[in-house]
Amino acid sequence: MSSATTILLVEDDPAISMIIRETLIGECGHFASVGSIAERNAWLADHHPDLVITDVVLPDGDGIDSLRVDCGTPVIVLSAQNTLDTAVRATGIGSYDYLPKPFDLDELTASVRAALQRRAEPMVSTDPAQADSHGLVGRAPAMQAVYRTIARLASNDLAVLILGESGTGKEVVARAIHATGLRRAGPFVAINMAAIPRELIEAELFGHEKGAFTGAHSRNAGRFEQAAGGTLFLDEIGDMPLEAQTRLLRVLQSNEYSTVGGNQALRADVRVIAATHRDMRTLVADGRFREDLFYRLNVIPMTLPPLRDRRSDIAALVRHFVDAGRGSGLPDRQFAPAAMQWLERYDWPGNVRELGNVVQRLAVLSRDTVVTVRDVETVLHENGEGGGAAAPADLIARAVDDWAREQMASDAPEGELHGQLEAIVEAALFRRVLRDVRGNQLEAARRLGINRNTLRKRLGQLDIDPTHP
Ligand SMILES: Nc1ncnc2c1ncn2[C@@H]1O[C@H](COP(=O)(O)OP(=O)(O)OP(=O)(O)O)[C@@H](O)[C@H]1O
């Protein structure tokens, strides 16, 4: 690093300031540190640093809002206020990086080196009035990578693929990317691939002309047209039928599309954000998702952590849902500490969506203004969710539902679904029972409640050896 390089650190905590100085002193010719906005402004009046590293909460104000540096001077923001707001505002002042506190010193050094190397990069401007957390509540460490990615997406139009279990907030994140990005003045249009009959998907996406198919009584704009100038959110992309995938790929490659039944080429002017709770690599490996389309959508991948990996956000989310409920007429509620602990310990298989539903139900059902552990247990139990895991029968039903949805969306041969599922379920059942009765078919048939000959026949059809089930 050049010996002429000057770094300014704005940090009011002397201990942190000293550690950073020791870490970076060898990286630059001159290292200055100040502890307040007033000192910083006085220093900046006479100096032009090559890099500013700043804390956000300073004794005399907000370190980001008040910072005015020469265009081209990179800024690294360090903050314990780990919200999307801070990440976005940091990007708004053209900062090179945003490091949530506590940060790793090696990470800081790497960030400083990269910032100094690339300091001529064009800056992004974000309207500060737009900057809030965009519906995203939570500061857990597991969410920081998500916030940083959203902030970095603000200055470009790259395609994004959001992965994560159901209810983790994929749509909220897609909306936040739109709201903080270059296309925020345009529309945000969502389409859920799993909710539309497969034969209608292309007409929904690209629109159709009058008379294009039976029932097409008038011309209809598709989602691409509705989202022009804005963002198109393709939810449950893993459920998209193969023919529609081929068409979508062509559109993304050429940036042009035509309506169903139309022959005029229309320009596709959208940022595409796709999301799914499925394992895309498995879908690709199984031939159910086109690899080339996957790579086109997966330019910037983001994975949302399940709620059980960010339990420290649960209290804030509960507050958020209570406030939201109040906005729609539900009573205000406090949570007894033990009740909150219960919520924090629970595994939330349905993630933030499930938490929101439970909190709103608690707000309605609890008789007192303070929600108790008993209320929480009652509501989770009624939901069949007590004990932290779904009942086995529910799990089977959910698994079957997932399986059937996948089959319906794929090109599986028709007329075989029932037989296939029966074989899967029966094989698992027979194997378990045979193992537990050590291969005794008579006993197995008795426990299963079926005729011994029927069992023998089915074992043959399923290719199960009763002595080695
Ligand atoms: N970080 C968050 N802060 C506040 N609300 C959130 C957050 N994450 C999710 N939610 C809320 O949880 C619910 C589910 O979120 P969302 O629909 O975005 O999930 P999803 O991952 O898209 O689910 P699915 O895969 O089932 O479509 C919504 O009501 C959303 O507002």
Image (spheres, helix red, strand yellow):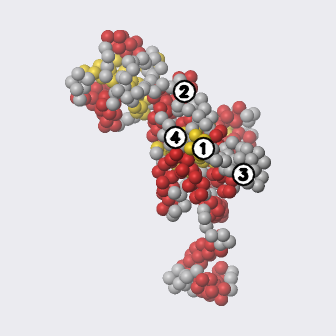
Q: Is residue 185 above or below residue 397?
A: above
**Mark whose residue sits in front, 2 or 1:** 1
Disc 2 to disc 3, C-alpha distance: 44 Å
- Please tell me whether mark 3 or mark 4 is closer to you in this view: 3
**Is the residue marked by circle 2 packed among few (<14), some (14-19), or many (20+) residues within 10 Å?**
some
At label 1, the amino acid type is: Ala
Badge 2 marks a residue whose secondary structure is loop
Tell me: residue 408, above or below residue 235.
below
Residue underneath mark 2: 131
Q: Earlier in the sequence, mark 2 or mark 1?
A: 2
Looking at the image, residue 165 lies above or below residue 454: above
Name the residue located 56 percent from the left edge and 75 percent from the top edge.
432
Cβ–Cβ below 8 Å for labels 4 and 1?
A: no
Q: Which residue is mark 4?
A: 312
Residue depicted at 33% across the width and 13% down the height: 43
**Amino acid identity at mark 4:** Ser
Query: What type is the residue that disc 3 sits on?
Result: Ala
At x 64%, y 40%, the residue is 225
Q: Secondary structure at mark 4?
A: helix
Q: Nearer the viewer, mark 4 or mark 1?
A: 1
Where is mark 3, residue-wise? 212
Report the front residue among 29 and 21: 29
Amino acid identity at mark 2: Ala
Q: Which residue is mark 1?
A: 265
Residue 317, percent across and down?
Answer: 59, 38
Q: CA distance from mark 2 to mark 4?
A: 23 Å
Marks 2 and 4: which is nearer the front? 2
